[in-house]
Amino acid sequence: MIAAGAALVLYWYGGRQLDHLEGMDAVQQWQVVRAAFTSQAPTSRAPMPGGDLLWSGGRWVSADGQQALVLIGRC
């Protein structure tokens, strides 16, 4: 999805920071966060793969068909 040109939106829950990345910036950042991504909502017992931050989220589609991968990072 990211490689096909979709934007990557990262919301850092604890720091209230929102990053919107497109193109190669999105591809590079996806490679960084991918190992800590889960498609299910995290629980307090969920292991944190590769560090202290776990990313959950999914695909967002606009009314005109544009797509983004929206992830929420939690500690």
Image (cartoon, rainbow, N blue to C red):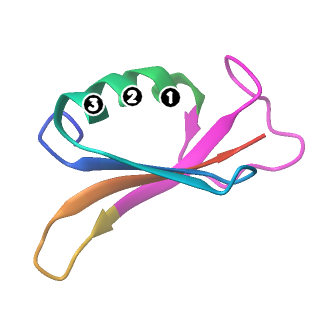
- The residues tagged by marks 3 and 1 sit, at their Cα atoms, a distance apart of 12 Å
Assign a secondary structure to mark 1: helix
> Label 3, on which residue?
25
Could you tell me which residue is drawn at 22 percent across and 60 percent down? Answer: 67
> In the image, what residue type sits under mark 3?
Asp
The reply to whether dot 2 and dot 3 touch (C-beta < 8 Å) is: yes
Q: Residues within 10 Å of mark 2 (few under 14, many from 20)?
A: some
> In the image, what residue type sits under mark 1?
Val
The x and y percentages for residue 9 are: 40, 51
Q: Which residues are magenta?
A: 37-59
Q: Quadrant of the C terminus?
A: top right
Asked if the magenta segment contains residue 51, the reply would be yes
**In this rendering, position of residue 47 left or right of residue 72:** right
**In this rendering, position of residue 66 left or right of residue 41:** left
> Label 1, on which residue?
33
The reply to whether dot 2 and dot 1 touch (C-beta < 8 Å) is: yes
